[in-house]
Amino acid sequence: MRVSLVGTVHAESGLANVGALQAILERSQPDVLFAEIPASHVDRYKDGSHGSLESITVARYLASHHVDVEPVDLAKPEQKFFDDTKDMFRAVERTSPEYCRLIDRHGVETRTGGFPYLNSDRCIQAWADIHRELMATIEWTGDSRLRELYDLWSHTNERRDREMMRNIALYSARTAVARGVFLVGAAHRKSIIDKASAVSGTGLPPIEWDLGGLGDK
């Protein structure tokens, strides 16, 4: 199976919008869409009521195309995880003007560059810079709680990336479809690319990855 990795953003922002993502799907013509959601969210994702840019796009695409939608993410964490993570980011925003500058610049690039930016090396570097400043700021504060929250957040994202890749491989092993598209937040893209390039040793059939993300033939 050939799988195109498409880095996305979960809310419309300028040129990163539903129409642009739908155009990528039209070019790709996938047999299956791999979704960055847990299984419990799949019905709302498919009918658009999930509310994300990806969900709304997929609902519109499904109105005229027959395609499987396969949820590949871990189960949603408890609300406390999200509340604590928001506290961590707010603390860093209050402390680091550089972090705020990097986030703002990424926002501008997303609005003006759309999906070509979100699927570029420039976006990968932007997220690397953001994460580096996030970590540096937390270290500078010396706040042990912030460090614990960062470690939990980072570990959770790593677990999610591994699970999503595993579930895509398992789907590929049990089906005979030719082409898939994996819609995932652009912040995950570098981790997914690294895992796609690594030798898995799972014994599952290999996947041919298209890492360009724009559905070009």
Image (cartoon, grey):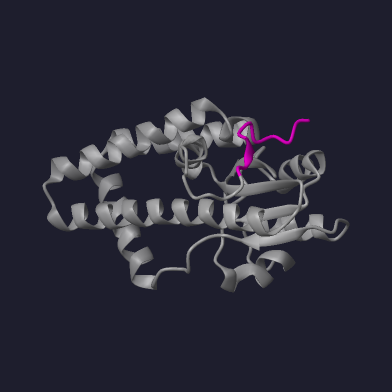
- The residue shown at (16%, 42%) is 139
Q: Please state, as top left, top right, bottom left or bottom right, where the C terminus lies in the image.
A: top right
What segment carries the magenta color?
206-217
Give the camera-side residue of 200 and 59: 200
Could you tell me residue 198's position as x and y percent?
Answer: 46, 37
Along the line of sight, which residue is nearer the eye, 36 or 68? Answer: 68
Asked if residue 67 is among those painted magenta in the image, a careful observer would answer no
Residue 26 at what x, y percent from top left? 82, 43
The quadrant holding residue 104 is: top left
**x 81%, y 59%: residue:** 62
Give how far across and how far down residue 8 sits, in percent: 59, 44
Find out whether residue 211 is within the magenta segment: yes
In the image, residue 137 lies at what x, y percent? 22, 40
Task: Specify the quadrant of the image occupied by residue 140.
Answer: top left
Q: Looking at the image, which is closer to me, 136 or 6?
A: 6
Which is more toward the observer, 66 or 203?
Answer: 203
